[in-house]
Image: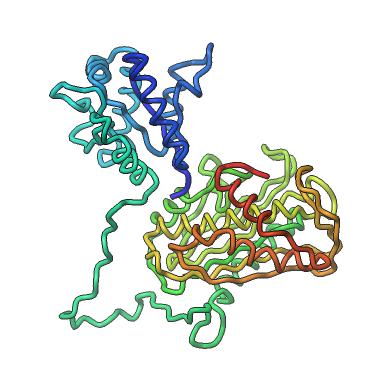
Amino acid sequence: MGTPKIFISYSHDSPEHKDWVLQLATDLRKNSVDASLDQWDLSLGQDVAAFMQKGIIESDRVLLICSENYVARAESGLGGVGYERLIVTADVVQNIDTKKFIPVVRDNNSDIKVPRFLGPRLYIDFSDDALYETKRDELLRELLGAPAQVKPPLGKSSYSSKPTPLDEPVRKVSPIGVAPGGAKILDDEWFNRQLGIAEKGIASLGLKAHMELRFGLHDSINKSQIDLVTSVKKSEIHTFGWPIAVTLDNRDEYRPRPYEDGIRAEISIQKDSFSGRESYDYWALLSTGDFFLLQSLFEDQRTENKIFFNTRIIRITEALLFASNLYTNLGVAPESRLSVRVTHRSLAARQLTSSSVNRDVFPRSTQEEQSQAEIVVMIGNIREALVDNVQRIAEPLFMLFDFAQFAPEVYTDIVRRFEKGEVS
């Protein structure tokens, strides 16, 4: 998964206990877990109840530090712990099999290690300080979706005589993303139909600068519409503007829609709308795992006839990280191959520059209308090779601007900052 949001619920038993919780939260943040803690995020005069409610509801996971005092206060419904119990209980009742709440046992010598309202949930025991690092790493693996032991895929029975159904999605693709007929899988008719829909939508707003993404799995999957939309929501990266494949469930006209072959969403924002700025996003995900996106870029709203090199690097970085999240959440095997194509259009007569005063660029222009780059990646290797793949996709774009090039250190700095949740 991407960067998980974590809320930590605990009782203020003693200064030493508060310091221990602070250390745990700090270690989590050092390891790419977005931990929220009252010692950092709650200010004087702030509504404490609202802080707790927002933290629990909006987080991906909630750590409940089950000290002996915490369990006693939860059982009796006293104070902030008692209020948090009401919120947690409502969620547990509605989703009995939820894994959102993780009991963390600490300073608890009683027989009751976990509040009864949580039921028989598996907890992690931090009672022994000598085992702190081991338990911390175990917790991090759970939060980051990186278990120490990975369940092997189910093999094919050697004794089955059942033939493969004719309608089962099977795609035989070469390592470079070419189908048996000789055409690239990303040139499939489905992708071109999505492009036609999106081009009409973005043209209706008069927007020009945009990026197109195409992802194609070399080995098809077969997922339901609910699997698709759930995986997309889990895969969004909220660092820079609206995420790729944004899901706006609070606006009926913009939320993802189910179709026979998958899901699609179109977010066409008029200039006088709630955001105050025109924008266009269209994305579609097939049940077989193929993904298409056309997304407007904000350069035209900031300055005329410019593109920002650092913004384009950031968007490519986000695209690859989203792909890693999406196919991992869809249960695609790490060794599976994925064709990725990134197209930047409306380049002619624009100048290449930077959106940051800290990254000076000599302005260069181009007369080419578009840049297109395609690579093949392995799902389990996307993050490891992230900087190299971003550079492979971005370099053909920048080369059109009078052979513009950027040092590997520039790519590394921008990509790593984005991974940390920073924009440069």
Instruction: Please name the colour scheme applied to the rendered image.
Output: rainbow
Q: Residue 412, relative to residue 171: is it above or below?
A: above
Which is more toward the observer, 262 or 215? Answer: 215
Report the side of 392 relative to 127 (left or right). Answer: right
On the image, which quarter does residue 117 sit in?
Answer: top left
Figure quadrant of the C terminus: top right
Residue 271's spot in the image, x, y percent? 74, 43
Furthest residue in direction left, as rendered: 111
Point 30% across, 23% down: residue: 85
Numbered disc total: 0
Report the side of 73 relative to 240 (left or right). Answer: left
Which is more toward the observer, 375 or 381? Answer: 381
Furthest residue in direction bottom, as rendered: 181
Which is more toward the observer, 404 or 247? Answer: 404
Point 26% across, 26% down: residue: 106
Residue 385's spot in the image, x, y percent? 53, 62
Report the side of 284 relative to 147 (left or right). Answer: right
Residue 270's spot in the image, x, y percent? 71, 45
Q: Residue 328, relative to residue 165: is it above or below?
A: above
Report the side of 31 relative to 132 (left or right). Answer: right
On the image, which quarter does residue 170 sit in?
Answer: bottom left
Point 32% across, 22% down: residue: 86
On the image, which quarter does residue 391 sit in?
Answer: bottom right
Which is more toward the observer, 279 or 231? Answer: 231
Residue 362's spot in the image, x, y percent? 85, 55
